[in-house]
Amino acid sequence: MLIREATVNDIEALTSLMEQLGYPTTIKSMRIRMNNIESSSGYHTLLASYEGKIVGMIGLVKGYYYEMDGSYIRTVAFVVDVDFRGRGIGKKLLEEAEDWARRMGATGIGLNSGNRPERLNAHKLYKNMGYIEKSIGFAKSLN
């Protein structure tokens, strides 16, 4: 398994992974999104490849606390291909994300995960890696 930064050549694989995460998209839309993300210095996208196939991704963004000094990293997208789950790929992506967060000087890392049955195994992974349930998330569409 290899963990590396995403490039513009990875758009098709990223599009497929977003669909598996539950967010259908097109290659054209994913290309626009990644161009925006890559032009923002606080973002970092890592990919996992297994036997030459991209099988996972984690998208990170650096933020600054209002309530205390310092910065944190937020995991804003995280998925492992359904056919490759249970092989330690998610754990390795999270470990690489945490290493990047430390290099960026962050004092914390967090993520939100849907409260749906298909996310229960992901929740177990987070807990096994030392993440704690801390809040309830809310969202509102502005469209």
Image (spheres, rainbow, N blue to C red):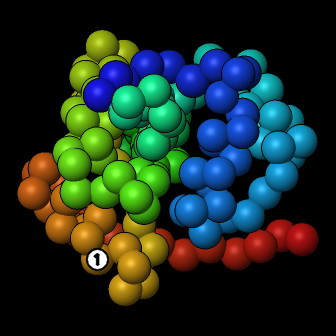
Q: Is residue 41 above or below residue 94?
A: above
User: Is residue 95 at all visible to an observer of this figure?
Assistant: yes
Q: Secondary structure at mark 1?
A: helix
Residue 67: image quadrant is: top left
Residue type indicated by callout 1: Leu
Q: Residue at x 37, y 24 (%)?
A: 3
Question: Extreme top residue here?
Answer: 103
Residue 105: image quadrant is: top left
Residue placed most toward the observer, 68 or 76:
76
Quadrant for the N terminus in the image? top left
Q: Is residue 140 left or right of residue 32?
A: left
Q: Is residue 45 above or below residue 74?
A: above
Structural crowding at the residue carrying mark 1, measured as other residues with C-alpha within 10 Å and reported as few (<14), some (14–19) or many (≥20): few
Question: Extreme front residue here?
Answer: 51
Residue placed most toward the observer, 113 or 119:
119
Q: Residue at x 57, y 24 (%)?
A: 6
Q: Residue at x 43, y 19 (%)?
A: 4
Question: Extreme bottom residue here?
Answer: 117
User: Is residue 38 at all visible to an observer of this figure?
Assistant: no
Q: Is residue 8 left or right of residue 20?
A: right
What residue is pinned by disc 1?
120
Q: Residue at x 79, y 26 (%)?
A: 35
Q: Is residue 79 above or below residue 46?
A: below
Residue 19: image quadrant is: bottom right
Q: Is residue 97 left or right of residue 11?
A: left
Residue placed most toward the observer, 94 or 53:
53
Residue placed most toward the observer, 18 or 108:
18
Residue 136 at x, y percent in the picture = 39, 76
Residue 29 at x, y percent in the picture = 86, 46
Residue 7 at x, y percent in the picture = 64, 19
Q: How many marks?
A: 1
